Image: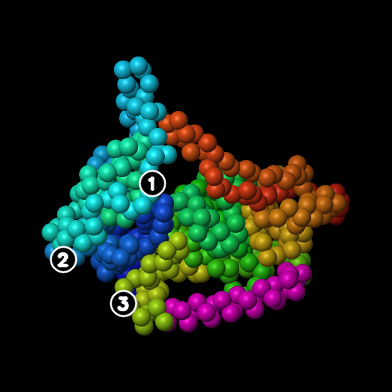
């Protein structure tokens, strides 16, 4: 225990005072070529990332502020990341010139006469390879391609920008250093692996937190079966002032690997508690047999989770044997398997949580939780909510997410008949993203059609319970 505490103090000392800059051991989100590829990585001197056909070390990113822009350059020691200023990045604004009659020159151009027969470019691949061997940068190669194109000047400004962007992504890829936050993590997973977060979209997650009235000094009870995204979002909003209690109905907590990506300090992580439902039940006002109602529902889930844990363990062992470098996965995050007790982010491991202290259990049994948020797509919500609502204080709000409407409608009917809640409503958030560019503003052609549904309400004292208390 002494060694663990000493190592924790050393790693906390390595954390920079400015949270806007990166440090060794932190998690970052790398945005390659304006969202073409999103990668979560943990920074270390030995960490590397393959961009295109080039392997670059991530050590230049350590100590840089979030939002920094890097370019892949080739030097005597091989490919490396070089930090550039945002002003030197290519601009996508269209500067339209006007002719003598007041009509824009771009309107006079037409792409209909252009024929794509691979003869417009006089610069061959051998010439490009020779330029790379001579030390030419990616921007210089792009400029050479533009200068040797016989049809570039005949294209419209929009076509010219598309041509520049296409060549820049190939010969001069750029990497944007982003801070992992609730929005960036949710958007990345929703884009790459939406099933891992239960198809929870960013606007739906925001509405969940708002309907549950999550704020400072709140004690939030959460059932998180979306990889830990919901737990991390609540803890980020609380900011270390208040508790996030993640409960579960089986022997092991639900996987919460995403929590480690938030770079939480030890103070915030100490406010994240994982506790089984049986520990939260008070013998005075709750029957312990409530937890047995979920055993049948959980049997198949426990079997699948056991298989997943075995697969994860075997995968971790194989990753250790394959390479000594930290693992970097596209659109995903895998912690360094060689540092299971790494506490640089304040949390020991993804599934570890501080055991709920008895004084907190007593306090929550007396006052109740201030709000409840549930994202459990694999559980039967009707009986689940009826067991969880007695843990809330009276007039406490709750919000339940599900990808489909029917489970929430059934749960809403059970709450209405049991008279446990009021102000019940089912909301369907809808987000529409627009592309805003000169002379071409329209909704994005590829966007999500459905962001799930939310059942919200306020817990009240039922008439039967009130009569029993009287």
Give the mark, 1 or 3, whose residue is nearer the N terminus: 1
**Few, some or many C-alpha atoms within 10 Å of disc 1 (few <14, some 14-19, many ≥20)?**
few
Residue 385 figure quarter: bottom right
Q: Which residue is mark 3?
A: 324
Q: Is residue 304 left or right of residue 142?
A: right
Q: Residue at x 28, y 65 (%)?
A: 54
Asked whether 75 or 327 is in front, the reply is: 75
Asked whether 98 or 306 is in front, the reply is: 98
Residue 46 figure quarter: bottom left
Q: Nearer the viewer, mark 3 or mark 2?
A: 2
Residues shaded magenta: 291-317
Q: Which residue is mark 1?
A: 115
Q: Secondary structure at mark 3?
A: loop
Q: Which residue is mark 2?
A: 77
Q: Decide whether residue 199 is among the magenta residues.
A: no
Q: Is residue 294 left or right of residue 229?
A: right
Asked whether 418 or 27 is in front, the reply is: 27
Q: Residue at x 55, y 68 (%)?
A: 255
Disc 2/disc 1 C-alpha distance (Å):
41 Å
Give the mark, 2 or 1, whose residue is nearer the N terminus: 2
Q: Nearer the viewer, mark 1 or mark 3?
A: 1
Q: Secondary structure at mark 2?
A: loop
């Amino acid at each position: 225990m002494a060694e663990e505490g000493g190592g924790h103090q050393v790693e906390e000392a390595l954390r920079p005072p400015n949270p806007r800059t990166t440090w060794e051991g932190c998690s970052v989100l790398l945005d390659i070529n304006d969202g073409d590829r999103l990668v979560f990585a943990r920074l270390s001197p030995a960490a590397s990332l393959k961009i295109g056909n080039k392997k670059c070390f991530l050590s230049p990113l350590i100590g840089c502020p979030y939002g920094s822009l890097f370019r892949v350059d080739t030097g005597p020691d091989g490919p490396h990341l070089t930090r550039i200023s945002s002003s030197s990045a290519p601009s996508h604004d269209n500067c339209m010139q006007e002719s003598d009659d007041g009509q824009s020159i771009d309107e006079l151009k037409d792409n209909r006469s252009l024929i794509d027969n691979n003869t417009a470019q006089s610069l061959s691949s051998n010439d490009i390879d020779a330029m790379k061997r001579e030390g030419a940068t990616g921007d210089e190669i792009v400029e050479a391609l533009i200068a040797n194109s016989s049809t570039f000047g005949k294209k419209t400004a929009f076509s010219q920008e598309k041509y520049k962007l296409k060549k820049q992504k190939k010969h001069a890829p750029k990497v944007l250093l982003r801070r992992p936050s609730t929005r960036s993590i949710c958007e990345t997973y929703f884009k790459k692996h939406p099933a891992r977060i239960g198809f929870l979209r960013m606007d739906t997650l925001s509405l969940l937190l708002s309907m549950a009235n999550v704020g400072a000094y709140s004690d939030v009870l959460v059932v998180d079966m979306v990889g830990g995204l919901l737990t991390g979002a609540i803890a980020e909003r609380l900011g270390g002032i208040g508790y996030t209690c993640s409960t579960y109905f089986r022997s092991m907590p639900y996987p919460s690997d995403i929590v480690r990506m938030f770079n939480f300090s030890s103070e915030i992580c100490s406010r994240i508690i994982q506790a089984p439902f049986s520990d939260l039940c008070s013998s005075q006002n709750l029957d312990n047999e409530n937890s047995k109602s979920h055993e049948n529902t959980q049997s198949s889930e426990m079997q699948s989770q056991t298989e997943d844990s075995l697969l994860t363990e075997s995968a971790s062992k194989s990753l250790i044997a394959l390479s000594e470098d930290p693992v970097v996965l596209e659109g995903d995050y895998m912690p360094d398997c060689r540092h299971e007790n790494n506490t640089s982010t304040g949390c020991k491991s993804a599934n570890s949580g501080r055991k709920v202290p008895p004084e907190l259990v007593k306090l929550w049994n007396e006052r109740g939780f201030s709000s409840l948020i549930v994202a459990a797509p694999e559980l039967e919500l009707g009986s689940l909510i009826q067991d969880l609502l007695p843990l809330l204080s009276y007039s406490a709000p709750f919000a339940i997410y599900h990808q489909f409407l029917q489970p929430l409608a059934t749960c809403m009917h059970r709450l209405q008949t049991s008279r446990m809640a009021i102000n019940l409503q089912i909301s369907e958030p809808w987000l529409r993203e627009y592309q805003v560019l000169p002379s071409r503003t329209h909704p994005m052609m590829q966007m999500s059609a459905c962001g799930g549904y939310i059942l919200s309400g306020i817990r009240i004292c039922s008439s039967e319970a009130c009569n029993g208390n009287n």
